[in-house]
Image (tube, rainbow, N blue to C red):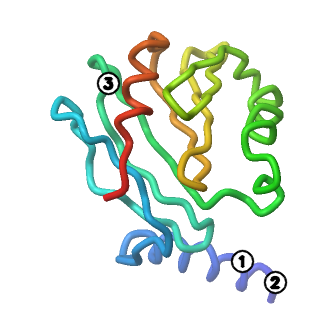
Amino acid sequence: TNNTTTKDTKTTEVLGQATQAAKPDFSTLRPTTIENQATDTKYDGEKKVASYNDVLKDINITVSQQPLPSDFKASPTSSVETLAKQINANEKISASDTTAFAGVSIKGPQTVVFTKNDLLFFITADKKIDVLTWSKYIEGLRSN
């Protein structure tokens, strides 16, 4: 019986994602600059994560955002810095009121992590993008 339950759950998850028109119960941020090509935001209700794909300097990126975890709220910046160290994102990016951390994996993709507007962001890029470009992109994220 356990196997059947597991299979049913997986089928439901896949179907749920395909047919899910749920909207996040938090304000998401989107790029405001004209040159960005952000696609529609997808929302995973179970994980409470909203994400969209975009192109930055001809490089594909995926932007994921979720409400800041409760254990991050007391000290968001240092909590994000600790998380960044765990994923080897040691390059600091300053963007006005936001400090982000970037790291490149051995396989090539770059990950950027930061907090803004009580949200936790993860952005993955197919290739490394320079600090100034990231800084401008992060500064351009606004509530939609």
Where residue 43 sits: x, y (%)?
Answer: 45, 65
- At mark 2, the secondary structure is helix
- Counting residues from the start of the chain, the first of labels 2 and 3 encountered is 2
Label annotation for residue 2: 2
Q: Earlier in the sequence, mark 1 or mark 3?
A: 1
State left or right for residue 63 relative to residue 82: left
Residue found at x 83% / y 58%: 71
Whether the residues at callouts 2 and 1 have beta carbons within 8 Å, the answer is: yes
Q: Which residue is mark 3?
A: 56
**Helix, strand or loop under label 3:** strand
- The quadrant in which the N terminus is found is bottom right
Instruction: Kindly indicate the quadrant of the structure image that contains residue 73.
Output: bottom right
Q: Quadrant of the C terminus?
A: bottom left
User: Local crowd at mark 1 within 10 Å, few (<14), some, or many (≥20)?
Assistant: few
Residue type at mark 2: give it: Asn
Q: Position of residue 112 (x, y in %)?
A: 58, 29
Q: Which residue shows up at 23% across the image and 34% down it?
A: 33
How far apart are the alpha carbons under marks 1 and 3?
A: 39 Å
Task: Tell me where residue 91 appears, x and y as whole percent.
Answer: 66, 14
Secondary structure, mark 1, is helix
**Circle 1/circle 3 CB separation < 8 Å:** no
Is there CB contact under 8 Å for labels 2 and 3?
no
CA–CA distance in space, label 2 to label 1: 6 Å
Q: Where residue 42 appears, x then y in whole percent?
A: 39, 61
Mark closer to the observer (1, 3): 3
Q: Is residue 63 above or below residue 47?
A: above
Q: Which residue is mark 1?
A: 6
Q: What residue appears at the point 45 percent right and 22 percent down from the top-left corner? A: 135
Front position in the image: 113 or 96: 96
Q: Which mark is residue 126?
A: none
